[in-house]
Image (cartoon, rainbow, N blue to C red):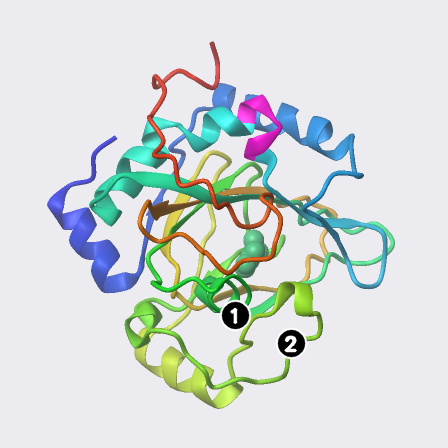
Amino acid sequence: MQLTNEQVAQFERDGYLFFEELFSPEEVAALDAAIPKINADLTRGGVRREASSDTVRFFHGPHLYNDTVGRLSRHPRLAGPAAQLLDSSIYVFQSRLVMKTGLTERPFSGFPWHQDFSTWYLIDGMVEPTPVIVAIFVDEVTACNAPIQLIPQSHRYGLITDRDREPEDESYSQIVIHPQRLRELVDEGGITALLGAPGSVLFMHSNLVHASTENISPLRRAFYYVIYDNIDNVCQNTTRSQYSASLDNTPITALPDDCLIR
Ligand SMILES: O=C(O)CCC(=O)C(=O)O
């Protein structure tokens, strides 16, 4: 898939692009069917649980061991635009399955206002904030099941260091943005909650400020994420496992368009 010049300009201006139902119901069914398989082995690296319960919060790196996510990470509707936005050969820096399960005993907790680049800068020694973050909706996202919220144009400020609090967990450092700074960003760019059908896809700049609240609905809101980067921006200082931060910058080649369903 190729973006138009207008879409590239929109990404540069707003820090994101959103495509409703980029994947068909059949393709989404394949992505959904991979979730129980990924959940079947919780002994692998890259599994992170909620602080207050055993509920899995996310899996890092499922593209490395699950064939469906491996194919998703090389899908031309994702890798094509990512290579175009990065204007280079690309590698997969990270993938994630964020479970955002519906309410069971405790709600799935939220993600505070942050930029993903802050984590990669603090933990992995990433130099350039170039990665393109792609989120693929597996479930319908409504106002009720904790949509991702974005502050358009906030990527233009680079890494924001006005920190609200110190990181609680060194294995997952990030700069949680101070409320005063957040106010300024929102006064300028507003806030957008991305709602959409399964199969919808978000492309986001690694410095775009985003968050989501806890999910108190009984409705799951699972997303796959694939994070692409230019092959020259490898994190030489990372101590994290390959599940969380890839040192393998082999350029990826896209698979055929029907790779999820054949
Ligand atoms: O999927 C979400 O609600 C947000 C996830 C997020 O911000 C992250 O993994 O950094």
Magenta-colored segment: predominant secondary structure: helix
Kind of residue at badge 2: Pro
Position above or below: 164 against 151: below
The type of residue carrying mark 1 is Leu
Q: Is mark 1 within 8 Å of ligand 1?
A: no
Residue to which mark 1 is pinned: 122
Image location of residue 115, percent across then percent down: 46, 67
Does any portion of residue 143 appear in the rendered image? no
Q: Magenta segment: does it hold 65?
A: yes
Residue 170 is situated, as x and y percent measured from the top left of the image, at 67, 69
Front label number (1 vs 2): 1
Identify which residue, 37 or 126, lies in the foreground. 126
Q: Are marks 1 and 2 in contact (CB under 8 Å)?
A: yes
State the residue position of label 2.
167
Q: Find residue 199 and report its horizontal and vertical position in percent.
A: 46, 34
Query: Dividing the image into four equal quarters, which quarter contains ligand 1?
Result: bottom right
The one nearer the camera, 40 or 200, is 40
Magenta extent = 63-68
